[in-house]
Image: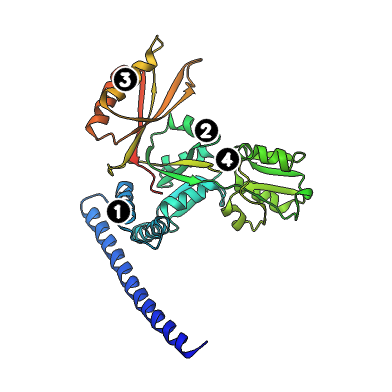
Amino acid sequence: MSDDLQKKLSVVRTEIDAIDARLLDLLNHRARCAQQIGQIKASHGEAGFIYRPEREAQVLRRIQEINPGPLSNDSVTWFFREVMSACLSLEQALGVTFLGPLGTFSESAATKHFGHAARLLPQVSIDDVFREVEASHADFAVVPIENSTEGAISRTLDLLMTTPLKICGEVVLRIHQHLLSNETSLDGITKVYSHAQSLAQCHEWLNRSLPNAQRISMGSNAQAAQFAACEAGAAAIAGEAAAERYQLPKLASNIEDEPNNTTRFVVLGRQDAGASGRDKTSLIMSAHNRTGALSNLLAPFSDAGVSLTRLESRPARHTLWEYVFFVDIEGHRAEPAVQAALDELGRRAAYLKVLGSYPLAVY
């Protein structure tokens, strides 16, 4: 390396070192400000509300709006989410429960939303995920609610009907499925473990590439990876997190049938989220058993100028051949138009439960 090149690199590296020192000072200054906010909340009897999803969404949106580049919005969003996660942990590490074991897409969704400073609490079933927060053993839950390929997650919808928890956030996660195995070729694969949803998402690829392999449904993709790591001739369909955690090589990558395969998760807590400016409200409703009942239920939204973004029907578990409807609408329940629609809906519906208003996912 020439002296001239070394001098030029040395100048830039010295500048980087100075910037790093300023960054470190600013990060610690931000952390002290976060601690001051915690102290102010505690003095006003709100010590338990250290995490405000609407405030975090506002911060991340603002960062994206003022980002001049060259760093992408994805990169700066990840960085600032981790900064906020670390600052929150100075007051209290949030306990976040999700469908385990470690290495699932649910874990990836939890860390995407809460950052790596959160206290991760994997559970063996979605039922247990709900119960941990209901019993105050965890602060928040992250559960899948729908997949772009396979549709609604039935167990999540069933539990939302009875839980006292509120939806206070959402996470949208791009799903890449990989075939993980210690085998060195597809010819050595005799069985494939995975969650039923993932098996369905890779159905056509399996038909083409492993038509004779036994398909075994598991409670989670991470559990499937655990089994595949210990058995000759076995493979698992799982994500990047499971591949890294269980040190399983990728025998094939991105094997999902739909290239835009995406799962939406909801964040559940014991308190509502405030309005962030770009929000969504989720609810459950049922109609009286008479002609035109559903159109009668939908009319308050159009009358108030409120847009529906999702309408999903599910059997009512207490009555045969009756249905409830899961609905997502634009806006926060505190907004006048949304409140007017909900008030009128309450007069018309046989049953109405507002699951929560919360910020739209920040990508």
Q: Earlier in the sequence, mark 4 or mark 2?
A: 2
Q: Earlier in the sequence, mark 3 or mark 4?
A: 4
SS at mark 2 in the image: strand
The residue type indicated by label 4 comes to Glu
Residue 62 shows which numbered tag? 1
Distance between mark 3 and mark 4 Cα atoms:
35 Å
Q: Is residue 47 left or right of residue 252?
A: left
Distance between mark 1 and mark 2 Cα atoms:
32 Å
Q: Nearer the viewer, mark 1 or mark 2?
A: 1
SS at mark 1 in the image: helix
Q: Nearer the viewer, residue 155 or 68?
A: 68
SS at mark 3 in the image: helix
Q: Nearer the viewer, residue 178 or 98?
A: 178
Q: Earlier in the sequence, mark 2 or mark 3?
A: 2
Residue at label 3? 299
The residue type indicated by label 1 comes to Arg
Distance between mark 4 and mark 2 Cα atoms:
13 Å
Q: Is residue 76 left or right of residue 201?
A: left
**Which residue does the image show at 58% across and 53% down from the upper left?**
240
Where is residue 199? Give x, y as percent: 64, 39
**Which residue does the image show at 57% across and 40% down from the upper left?**
258
Residue at label 2? 151
Classed neighbour count for the residue bearing mark 1: other residues with Cα under 10 Å, few (<14), some (14–19), many (≥20): few
State if disc 4 and disc 3 touch (CB < 8 Å).
no
Residue at label 4? 258
State if disc 1 and disc 3 touch (CB < 8 Å).
no
